[in-house]
Amino acid sequence: MVEAIQQETHKLYTLIYVFNNDNTKVLLGLKKRGFGMGRWNGFGGKVESGESIYDGAIRELKEESNLDAKNLEKKAIMYFKFEDNPIIIDVHLYTTSNISGDPVESEEMLPRWYDVPDLPYGFMWPDNKIWHPWLFEGKLFTATFYFKADQTTITGYKHSFVSSLKELEAAKFDS
Ligand SMILES: COc1nc(N)nc2c1ncn2[C@H]1C[C@H](O)[C@@H](COP(=O)(O)OP(=O)(O)OP(=O)(O)O)O1
């Protein structure tokens, strides 16, 4: 019952960070329309009904960049809450270096490789700057970010590091 109520207020999303083989570069996409337009981010979107989160991540990467990916590694579950919206955005974050093909611009995203020390933080969601160091240090984590309605101001956040995927999955439905 509690889970049913929580499910109604959570919307599932994926996010993939594609790295080159020595992890010195990351592929970002400039969002061309809709939610997050004008911001650089990893690739991802809503998980469709009947689809696993993992498969949704692979599908979104293909749709947005034309890349085929394998061996995604789950790194985090992040929750985003906006003060004017009861729906919590759950983002399941994956990484991979196992891709085939070359990134191609889509209707939704303009892809570009960035050197990891040189990311365009002025044109990203403000949370990225907070959790990137955790990701780049190889940590597994959960985090909740609280946003004002302006979609730019973070009023607070909490996070915890976990030591296994099992612990990460157990963190589902944080609120
Ligand atoms: C609010 O803070 C966020 N920060 C970060 N770093 N990333 C976020 C945030 N909120 C959502 N995201 C990610 C999750 C997804 O990867 C995208 C949003 O996906 P989108 O709305 O484009 O979903 P689609 O299914 O692709 O949308 P269409 O229906 O337009 O195809 O951003």
Image (cartoon, helix red, strand yellow):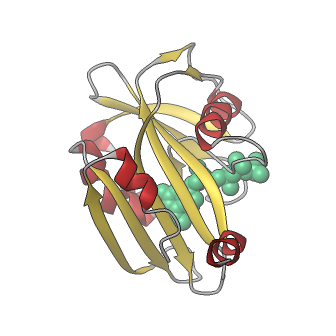
Q: Is residue 146 left or right of residue 138?
A: right
> Which residue is outermost to the right?
49
Determine the residue positioned at 58% across, 47% down. 14
* Vertical arrangement, residue 39 with respect to residue 118, above or below: below
Direction from residue 130 to residue 10 in the image, left or right: right
Give the quarter of the image for residue 9. Answer: bottom right
Is residue 172 shown left or right of residue 119? right
Q: Using residue 64 as the reference point, say whether residue 127 is left or right of it.
A: left
In the rendered image, the vertical position of residue 1 relative to residue 29, given as above or below: below
- Count of numbered labels shown in the rendering: 0
Residue 30 in the image: state x and y as whole percent. Answer: 57, 44
Q: Is residue 109 above or below residue 85?
A: above
Image position of 100 with respect to 93: above or below: above
* Ligand 1 location (quadrant): bottom right
Q: Is residue 124 visible?
A: no
What is the quadrant of the N terminus in the image?
bottom right
Please provide percent x and percent y for residue 140. 31, 49
Res 159 visible: yes
**Residue 24 spot, x, y in % from top left:** 27, 29
User: Based on the displayed image, in which of its 4 quarters is residue 129 positioned?
Assistant: bottom left
Residue at x 63%, y 29% (from the top left corner): 65
Q: Residue at x 45, y 53 (%)?
A: 169
In the image, farthest residue toward the left? 137
Which residue occupies 30% across, 47% down? 164
Of residues 55 and 33, the one nearer the viewer is: 55
Residue lying furthest front: 1
Q: Position of residue 61 (x, y in %)?
A: 61, 33
Looking at the image, which is closer to me, 126 or 172?
A: 172
